[in-house]
Structure formats: structure tokens, C-alpha cells
């Protein structure tokens, strides 16, 4: 059975992310009553207690609304990493290079970034990190993405001692407050993409960082590995499951039984996270198709066969439904997206 | 909110005390003889003056100007109210206190006028303070809360105005970044970071020409619009500003923090979004 962490169950130590966000809200002259409204934490945040992911999400939504400033998500991001989660945070801060850092982040994501699940891929001369919803928060998803991207950019800049040449893709239209992206992330931004991703030439992955120590890094990794693993959010777990089984056209019934619940319960749970099975499956298939187009240089026939479609025409129609575009223009856009690597 | 309620209560108490005084001292006129037009106009004046008085008290910080304005309006309110009560209650015309109360109306106008005079002087001081922070038009929304500077939306609006101008006069846009600002935030905390931003904003403001506009673009990035300057002159001015900031001493709780700036410069021409994106790219490469 697949382990996952329900959104309503307390699992995040309050002294970590939640306390940090509260402190930031206070430093901007917001009242606790506004910051903690509807979270069930109104009596005060006990640092030794646990908060549930949905409480933390509600708190972030309150903070964004109360402060009503375009830089809130970015400033919260500046504080997020390496965080205060003992061994996992320590392992992150001790990473000797970018590759280890990203691997550590992905391994301990349920502790370090419980709301969004980072996934790291690398091929040819491209390194890519993209963010997948763990609990579903459609209202503040763009702000969460800004927050998590800023957290990673700021951490790398701090550890690496220099600005890394990140390039950013956003699954949203261009915002009004693009100046915040310019300053906190970088000037290479692309909006209206199919996923929220950060890209970098892979030559940066293995450059040793100035303060790196191999021994300290190894010890920190070992200590982090000793700690009990925290389960990911339901949508992150489902994404992993679907990605693994994408070739056999997973069904709701089969998936529900692998998650150890009845299809009706599973459906209800997904609904509670503002999504449904088909939507999640389509998202995974879109990402896999993009991956095949870009990395394997596959054509429509090959992708259709890989994803279990009858023929290319069928796949093309479905792809249009998932993304609003046919594979042709997307492939051209992807080439444009990654074209700068060839130039660099 | 509670101060507003207190003001409402004290105004209500004053009005009630007047009504009580009149009712106790005079005899009520039969309803048939009431002049309704007079009552409506005088009573209405009193009520509206009460509302103005409340608006002044709730929207301005306490001070000489606020007290004069609110006091004048309160006198007008009470004078009109006394007039209004006169219509309904007959008081001996020889009574001095009744005349004194009615003369509150012209007295209030006098106090209000004095208040307006001081308000004008206060406004001139504030405008002087706002110079270099705004240009051409005033809009109360787009101000950054930490530095009290205009934000990126205001800057884009100004660039749009600038790009529409056809005269040959040049205009330059300069961006400034604080070196290693992320480190200040991490090592000294975000509150210290905010203080650094305020210090840099002040230093830049002190060294700008009256025509220049300083904005906080985002984070630690400041933008200066320099009308009438070509690129070389603007670059020169930017270098001077960087020198001024680096000679500044900033004292954090844990010791002195060195602050230096780097800058990028371009003529303010073309679409604002593309111009800003290009200049930001230049800043990242620097």
C-alpha cells in the first residue's frame, strides 16, 4: 500500500514553516487574528505542536490576503530554505554542490517543502527541477510556486556565493508584478508553459561550492537518513504512482486499490484536494509526452505507442484537450525554450 | 475604530447638552408655528458639519491643523444647532447666553479659516518631502510600505508617459542593486534588511536632482528616472550615487554593515516592459 499524508492530519512541526510565516506577517504589522483566521490555530501557535498541511495552507492564504503586497510570496520564500528541520535542513545546508542539494531536497521534500513536491531531472546538458502540487491549492498555487522557486534560488545563491543562471517556466499567464520575479528569481522568465519549472545548464550541477566539506556533507546525509521518512501529500504520491504506471493506462479502480481505499473514497479524497483522477492522469501524461518530445526527440507515433494510445491521431486529439495546443507548436516552443543551452 | 466611536459619542453629548439647556431655559413653541424650512436648513447644516468634523478627526493624525479644522467645524455645528433649537424653543431674546451660542457659527468659520491657512503650509511641506518620490501626477496607491517610495507599477506608468513624449529631451533610467543584500537578510535578519533599504533610499534621495524620480523596483533593486540626461551623464550621476552610498556607515545590532551598490543604465525609450526586462538582464550579468 502506498503511504501518503492526509491534508487534515497534523504533520508539520509548528515551530518550522508555520511559525516562520507567522513571524513574517507580524513583522509586516499584521494581526494574529487575521493571519490565523479559519485555521483553528487562533488561540495561538504552540511551537511544540503539529499543524496540518491544510492549516498551513490556510495560514499562507491569509497572510497573502492580509499583507496584500506583491512581494509577500517572495519574502516568505527567502526564509523557507534550508529551514529548521534538524537533520534534513542540515544536510541541505551542507550539500557540497548543486546536484547533491537538489537530490537532498527531492529526497526529504515532505519535510522541507511539504506543500509542493520538487522533481529533479537531468539530460544532455540540461538540468530541470519542476514543482508538483502535494495537497492541491488552486487559489494560491501561483504564490506557492513563486515562494518555492525563490527559496531554492536564494539557497543556491547563498551556498554557491553567486547568482546561478536559472531560467524559469510558469504554468500561468504573465503577472502584473513581474518586477518581483526579476529581482528575486532572474530576468529569464517564460509564462504560459505547461509546467512550473526551473532550468539550468547541467555543467553547474557538479561545481564544488566554496564552503563545501565532503566529510561534513556525508555525515549530514547519514544523520538525515536515520530520521523517519515523512509521507508525501496525496497528490504528490499520486503523481509518483501515475508516472510509474503511465504506460499501462492506470484506471481509477486499480489506483484506488493500490492506495488501499475504495474508488468512491478515493474520488472523494481527490475532490477534497480540488482535483479529480482524470485531471491528475492527464497532467502526468502531458509531462511524459513533453519529456519524450524533448529528450527522446520522439514523434507522435512513438509517444502514442508509449502512452498506450491506439494511434497518433487519437493521441494528438487528447494532447490538444490536455494542453489546448497540438504537439507541433509545443515542440517548437520547447525547442525555443531550451535553445539557449545550445548557444551557451 | 474605538476613537471614532468616542468622537461620535462626544459630539452626540454636546448636541444633547445644548438641547437639554434650551429645553430647560425656554418654552416650546407650538408645533403649528414651526418654520420647517428654517429647521431643516439649520439642522442639516449642524448634521453635515458634524460629519465633516468626524471625517477630519478620523483621517488625520492629531496636531495643530487637525484641532483647528475639527474645532472650527464643531463650532459651526453647535452654532447651527443653537439656531435650529431656537426655532422650536422660545428663549428670552435678552438672554446673553443664547446670543453667545449663536455667534459660535461665525467664530467657527474664523477658526476653520485659520486651520485652512495652516493646512496649506503643511501641504507645502509635504509636497516638498514628496518631491523626487513622485512626478507629474499624484496617486495614493502605488507606494511601498517600507521605503515610502513609488513602486514598479508607478515607474512603468512614468516610462509610458516618457515614451509618448516627442521632444528631443533625453531621459535615462538607472537601476541600482545592493551588493550581497541576501546575505544581510540571512545574517542580520529581515528587519535589519528593511533598515538597510530605508537607509539607502534616504541616501539616494538626498543626492538626487529635484527632477529625478526614485522608485523601489522590487526587493533590493531601486530605479531612478533621470529626465533630461543622456546615457553618459546618467552613468556619471549613477557612479556618484554609488560612491555616496558606499561612504555611508550603517550600524546593525551586531556591528557595522558595509553597503555598496552596483548599477545598470539605459536610455528610457521604447516599451517599458521590454526596457525593464533588458536592464534587469544587464543587472544579473553584472
Image: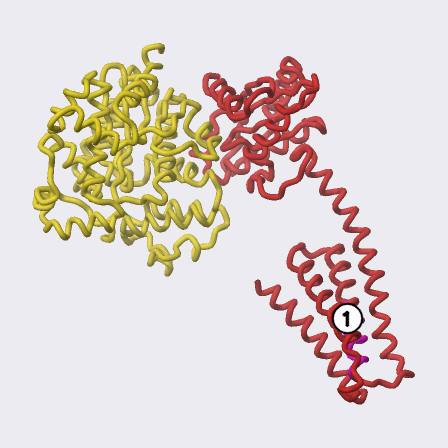
Magenta span dominant secondary structure: helix
Between B138 and B196, the one lying in front of the other is: B138
Q: Write down the colour of chain A.
A: yellow
Which residue: 17% across, 45% down?
A4
Between B69 and B251, the one lying in front of the other is: B69
Quadrant, the C terminus of chain A: top left
Name the chain letter of the residue that bears numbered label 1: B
Q: Position of residue A153 (x, y in %)?
A: 37, 28
Dividing the picture into quadrants, the one containing residue A259 is top left
Note whether A43 is above or below B38 in the view shown. above
Which residue: 27% across, 20% down?
A328
Dividing the picture into quadrants, the one containing residue B209 is top right
Q: Position of residue A119 (x, y in %)?
A: 24, 30
Which residue: 21% across, 31% down?
A318
Residue furthest to the top in view is A343
Magenta stretch, residue numbers: B77-88
Dividing the picture into quadrants, the one containing residue A255 is top left
Q: Classify residue A294 as left or right of residue B122.
A: left
Q: Write down the colour of chain B.
A: red
- Is A135 inside the magenta-drawn segment? no
SS at badge 1: helix
Amino acid at each position: 500500500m502506498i503511504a501518503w499524508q492526509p491534508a487534515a492530519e497534523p504533520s508539520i512541526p509548528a515551530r518550522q514553516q508555520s511559525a516562520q510565516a507567522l513571524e513574517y506577517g507580524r513583522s509586516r504589522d499584521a494581526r494574529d487574528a487575521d493571519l490565523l483566521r479559519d485555521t483553528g490555530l487562533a488561540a495561538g501557535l504552540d511551537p511544540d505542536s503539529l499543524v496540518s498541511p491544510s492549516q498551513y495552507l490556510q495560514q499562507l492564504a491569509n497572510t497573502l490576503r492580509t499583507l496584500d503586497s506583491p512581494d509577500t510570496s517572495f519574502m516568505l520564500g527567502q526564509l523557507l530554505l534550508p529551514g529548521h528541520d534538524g537533520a534534513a535542513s542540515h544536510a541541505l545546508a551542507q550539500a557540497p554542490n548543486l546536484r547533491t542539494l537538489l537530490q537532498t531536497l527531492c529526497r526529504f521534500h515532505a519535510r522541507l517543502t511539504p506543500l509542493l513536491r520538487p522533481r529533479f531531472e537531468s539530460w544532455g546538458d540540461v538540468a530541470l527541477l519542476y514543482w508538483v502540487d502535494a495537497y492541491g491549492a488552486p487559489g494560491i498555487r501561483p504564490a506557492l510556486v513563486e515562494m518555492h522557486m525563490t527559496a531554492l534560488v536564494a539557497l543556491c545563491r547563498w551556498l554557491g556565493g553567486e547568482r546561478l543562471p536559472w531560467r524559469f517556466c510558469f504554468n500561468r499567464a504573465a503577472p502584473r508584478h513581474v518586477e518581483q520575479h526579476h529581482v528575486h528569481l532572474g530576468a529569464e522568465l517564460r509564462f504560459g508553459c505547461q509546467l512550473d519549472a526551473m532550468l539550468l545548464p547541467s555543467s553547474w550541477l557538479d561545481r564544488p561550492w566554496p564552503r563545501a566539506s565532503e566529510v561534513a556533507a556525508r555525515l549530514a546525509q547519514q544523520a538525515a537518513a536515520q530520521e523517519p521518512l515523512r509521507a508525501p501529500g496525496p497528490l504528490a504520491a499520486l503523481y509518483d504512482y501515475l508516472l510509474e504506471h503511465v504506460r499501462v493506462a492506470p484506471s481509477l479502480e486499480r489506483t484506488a486499490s493500490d492506495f488501499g481505499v475504495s474508488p468512491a473514497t478515493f474520488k472523494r479524497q481527490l475532490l477534497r484536494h480540488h482535483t479529480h483522477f482524470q485531471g491528475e492522469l492527464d497532467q502526468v501524461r502531458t509531462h511524459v509526452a513533453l519529456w519524450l518530445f524533448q529528450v527522446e526527440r520522439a514523434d507522435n507515433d512513438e509517444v502514442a505507442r508509449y502512452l498506450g494510445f491506439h494511434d497518433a491521431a487519437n493521441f494528438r486529439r487528447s494532447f490538444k484537450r490536455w494542453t489546448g495546443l497540438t504537439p507541433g507548436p509545443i515542440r517548437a516552443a520547447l525547442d525555443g525554450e531550451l535553445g539557449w543551452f545550445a548557444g551557451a | 475604530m474605538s476613537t471614532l466611536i468616542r468622537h461620535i459619542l462626544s459630539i452626540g453629548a454636546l448636541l444633547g447638552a445644548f438641547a437639554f439647556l434650551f429645553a430647560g431655559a425656554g418654552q416650546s413653541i407650538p408645533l403649528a408655528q414651526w418654520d420647517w424650512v428654517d429647521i431643516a436648513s439649520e439642522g442639516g447644516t449642524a448634521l453635515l458639519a458634524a460629519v465633516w468634523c468626524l471625517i477630519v478627526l478620523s483621517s488625520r493624525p492629531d496636531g495643530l491643523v487637525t484641532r483647528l479644522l475639527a474645532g472650527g467645524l464643531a463650532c459651526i455645528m453647535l452654532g447651527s444647532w443653537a439656531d435650529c433649537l431656537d426655532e422650536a424653543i422660545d428663549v428670552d431674546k435678552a438672554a446673553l447666553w443664547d446670543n453667545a451660542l449663536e455667534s459660535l457659527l461665525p467664530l467657527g468659520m474664523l477658526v476653520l479659516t485659520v486651520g485652512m491657512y495652516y493646512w496649506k503650509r503643511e501641504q507645502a511641506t509635504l509636497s516638498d518631502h514628496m518631491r523626487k518620490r513622485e512626478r507629474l501626477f499624484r496617486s495614493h496607491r502605488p507606494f511601498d510600505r517600507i521605503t515610502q517610495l513609488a513602486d514598479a507599477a508607478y515607474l512603468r506608468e512614468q516610462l509610458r508617459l516618457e515614451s509618448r513624449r516627442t521632444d528631443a529631451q533625453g531621459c535615462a533610467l538607472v537601476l541600482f542593486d545592493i551588493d550581497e543584500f541576501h546575505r544581510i537578510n540571512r545574517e542580520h535578519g529581515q528587519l535589519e534588511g528593511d533598515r538597510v533599504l530605508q537607509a539607502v533610499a534616504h541616501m539616494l534621495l538626498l543626492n538626487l536632482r529635484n527632477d529625478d524620480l526614485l522608485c523601489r523596483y522590487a526587493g533590493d533593486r531601486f530605479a531612478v528616472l533621470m529626465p533630461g540626461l543622456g546615457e553618459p551623464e546618467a552613468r556619471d550621476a549613477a557612479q556618484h550615487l554609488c560612491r555616496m552610498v558606499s561612504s555611508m556607515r550603517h550600524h546593525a545590532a551586531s556591528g557595522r554593515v558595509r553597503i555598496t551598490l552596483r548599477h545598470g543604465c539605459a536610455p528610457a525609450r521604447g516599451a517599458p516592459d521590454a526596457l525593464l526586462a533588458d536592464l534587469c538582464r544587464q543587472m544579473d550579468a553584472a
